[in-house]
Amino acid sequence: MNPHELFQQEVRHNIQGLAGDAELHALSNTWMRDIAKHKWVYNFAWMGRPAIQFPTDAWAMQELIWSVKPDLIIETGIAHGGSLILYASLLALQDMCDAIEAGETFDPRASKRKVLGLDIDIRAHNREAIEAHPMASRIQMIQGSSVAADVVAQVKDIAKGYQKVMVCLDSNHTHEHVLAELEAYAPLVSKGSYCVVFDTLVEDMPADLCSDRPWGPGNNPKTAVHEYLRRQDDYRVDTSIQHKLLLTVAPDGYLQRVA
């Protein structure tokens, strides 16, 4: 076994150890519960745009994008646009690496890879900032409910032109809405790629953390994921991701398409 394989074997062993450490999982949940009171997740940006994500989840997304090499990433929920910028920049980096490996000149204008963002309300100041960003050429936005028939139809039409598709669901977090998003967009994901459902953590947090929202324990992305998985067998939960992160807003939310 070469040194690279030995290191990966060690990593797998580490993740298995984390998966079985119930006390550490409980401490992680306590930390995430307490940090939520300070809106900690609001404190980070990517290339100048606020990205309302745990840094650990952003790192996991970087690993998945490098591994899958999607040419289209669909994200529901835009907010300030930081995630769109993150994904667009990672696709640009992938294009550059592809060109280097092929011994070709990197031409960013020649790439077809892009990010498609959906939001029911793209606020003017956020749209302006996203459209003025250096990554803007790789981003397309659609304003409207992600589960509206006309929006779903637009997305499906756009996705027809792409080989490898990844989906990220991060908009309205009610059970009904997320389940409808899964039914609409999970079938677009390529085999081996991922549909990542954010904020499944809501199910594991106290109800008072969501007292001003229409979702909470019993009515959230995780309950929607579990119902969706009961209905079909095209996906599996990639638990290795949540186990290695420990601090994640998406437990049971990293769904890999296997069929």
Image (tube, rainbow, N blue to C red):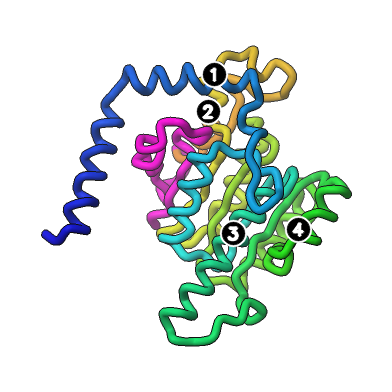
Q: Position of residue 215 (x, y in %)?
A: 66, 24
Going by the numbered disc 2, the residue's amino acid type is: Leu
Q: Position of residue 220 (x, y in %)?
A: 60, 28
The magenta stretch spans which residues? 230-259
Q: Is residue 156 magenta?
A: no
Of callouts 3 and 2, which one flags the residue occurring earlier in the amino acid sequence?
3
Going by the numbered disc 1, the residue's amino acid type is: Arg
Of callouts 1 and 3, which one flags the residue occurring earlier in the amino acid sequence?
1
Q: Do residues under tags 1 and 2 come within 8 Å of each other at their CB atoms? A: no
Q: Label 3: which residue?
A: 73
> Alpha-carbon distance for marks 2 and 4?
27 Å
Secondary structure under tag 2 reads helix
Q: Label 2: which residue?
A: 201
Quadrant where the C terminus lies? Answer: bottom left
Of callouts 1 and 2, which one flags the residue occurring earlier in the amino acid sequence?
1
**From what the image shows, is residue 31 above or below residue 50?**
above
Secondary structure under tag 3 reads strand
Going by the numbered disc 3, the residue's amino acid type is: Ile
Going by the numbered disc 4, the residue's amino acid type is: Met
> Alpha-carbon distance for marks 4 and 3?
12 Å
Q: Which mark is residue 205?
A: none
> Alpha-carbon distance for marks 1 and 3?
30 Å
**From what the image shows, is residue 28 above or below residue 69?**
above
Q: Which mark is residue 141?
A: 4
> Alpha-carbon distance for marks 1 and 4?
32 Å
Task: Please tell me which residue lies in front, 206 or 244.
Answer: 244
For image coordinates 17% across by 58% down, the residue present is 3
For image coordinates 50% across by 50% down, the residue present is 61
Of callouts 1 and 4, which one flags the residue occurring earlier in the amino acid sequence?
1
Q: Label 1: which residue?
A: 33
